[in-house]
Image: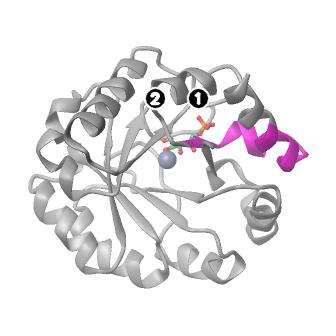
Amino acid sequence: MVKIAPSILSANFAKLGDEIIDVDKGGADYIHVDVMDGNFVPNITIGPLIVEAIKPITSLPLDVHLMIDNPDLYIPVFANAGASIITVHQEATVHLHRTIQLIKSNGVKAGVALNPGTPVEMIKDVLGEIDLVLIMTVNPGFGGQSFIPFTIDKIKQIAEWRDQYGFNFEIEVDGGVNTTTAKSCAQAGADVLVAGSAVYNQNDREQAILQIRQAVEK
Ligand code: DX5
Ligand code: ZN
């Protein structure tokens, strides 16, 4: 069954603890934490102090998506704060292989994300080293954007390489995932669907998560 990772970017930050408990009880598989630095993307969001504060609130894995330049500088601090998975952008690091090793040496699962405009070939050589590939289906920076259709082909290619070479990373998609777009992502090979506004803009988060799952199974 497809995993659902609600993005707390669309939560009410004034009551973040309750917002996390809500999706935890509502059947979420991961808590997706969007970290933005105002350089790599034009928005500033969450730092390690927030990750540390929410860690005791939930037993779900904290899926930390670093949309920041120089990720190596902050990987140890996010690992110590309680991240379960740390995903860096290929575009944000020159020495991707070294960055992946740094994440793993901190005892955390390693993910690599690709912007819509970055070809999947850019990460082909490290696919055997990682636990998660994150295909961005919008340009990162904000919740509530529209899904970019051509990214489906990227999910398919990554899934094809995984089969061909026997890798076992998860494929996650992020951006514009809702009851209309979820199925084609899952059919293309996505295992984890990040959903921000599709979950948090509804009052009943359990129902919102369920509706995405049902849309995939239909
Ligand atoms: C976008 C973030 C996403 C965002 C998704 O830069 O990486 O995780 O929260 O939000 P929705 O699901 O509303 O597109
Ligand atoms: Zn994200």
Which quarter of the rendering shows the N terminus? top right
Protein image colouring = one colour
Camera-nearest residue between 146 and 39? 146
* Residue at the (31%, 79%) spot, across then down: 76
**76 in relation to 197, above or below:** below
In magenta stretch: residue 202:
yes
Residue flagged by tag 1: what amino acid is it? Gly
Q: Which residue is mark 2?
A: 137
Q: Nearer the viewer, residue 119 or 212?
A: 212
Q: Are marks 2 and 1 in contact (CB under 8 Å)?
A: yes
Q: Can you tell which quarter of the image residue 208 is in?
A: top right
* Callout 1: SS: loop
Give the residue pinned by disc 1. Answer: 176
Q: Report the side of 80 relative to 60 (left or right).
A: left
Which quadrant, please, contains the C terminus? top right
Say if disc 2 is inside 8 Å of ligand 1.
yes
- The question of residue 82 being in magenta is answered with no
Residue at the farthest top position: 150
* Residue placed most toward the observer, 58 or 127: 127
Going by the numbered disc 2, the residue's amino acid type is Thr
The residue drawn where x is 39% and y is 51% is: 38
Q: Position of residue 140 (x, y in %)?
A: 43, 38
From the Cβ of disc 1, is ligand 1 less than 8 Å away? yes
Disc number placed over residue 85 in the picture, else none:
none
Q: Residue furthest right?
A: 204
Residue bounds of the magenta highlight: 193-210
